[in-house]
Amino acid sequence: MPKTLASIKKSLDSNLGKRLMLKANGGRRKTIERSGILAETYPSVFVIELDQEENAFERVSYSYADVLTETVELIFFDDTTRGLALGQQ
């Protein structure tokens, strides 16, 4: 797992356009799981376009600090459908 905000951003930049599974802390012991595509990265946040058939809204954004503090876990899927995790040990 990357240990700095810069290394997290660099890792996400290399995965632009790839499918992923997002697990986020929803508060009050809730975990939110969503799937989509990593659409864009900005200096402070990244944007995920969600699958429309599963979600009521189109896009969500999170900060790189959310990945660093493990509030958000991203699991990227490669072509053989095995997951590569970012944000977990």
Image (tube, helix red, strand yellow):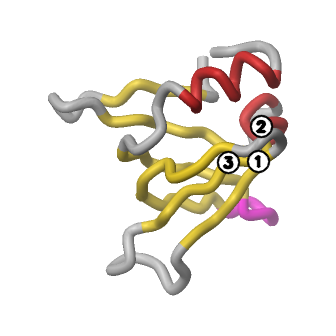
> Spatial distance from mark 1 to mark 2, Cα to Cα?
6 Å
Cβ atoms at labels 1 and 3 below 8 Å apart: yes
* Residue type (three-letter) at the residue carrying disc 2: Tyr
Please identify the dominant SS of the magenta region. strand
Q: Position of residue 55 (x, y in %)?
A: 46, 78
Cβ atoms at labels 1 and 2 below 8 Å apart: yes
* SS for dot 1: strand
Sequence-wise first label, 3 or 2 = 3
Which numbered dot is residue 46? 3
* Residue 4 vs residue 87, the one in the foreground: 4
* Residue type (three-letter) at the residue carrying disc 3: Phe
* Residue 89 vs residue 28, the one in the foreground: 89
- Residue linked to disc 1: 45
Instruction: Report whether 37 appears left or right of 24.
Output: left
Which residue is located at x 63 percent, y 15 percent? Answer: 1
Instruction: Tell me which corner region of the image, top left, top right, bottom left or bottom right, holds residue 48.
Output: bottom right
Position of the C terminus, as image quadrant, is: top right
Q: Which residues are magenta?
A: 26-30
Sequence-wise first label, 1 or 2 = 1
Q: Is residue 86 above or below residue 76?
A: above
Which residue is located at x 58 percent, y 49 percent? Answer: 40
* Residue type (three-letter) at the residue carrying disc 1: Val
> Spatial distance from mark 1 to mark 3, Cα to Cα?
4 Å
Instruction: Tell me which corner region of the image, top left, top right, bottom left or bottom right, holds residue 76.
Output: top left
Residue 64 is covered by the magenta coloring: no
Q: Is residue 52 above or below residue 69?
A: below
- Residue linked to disc 2: 64
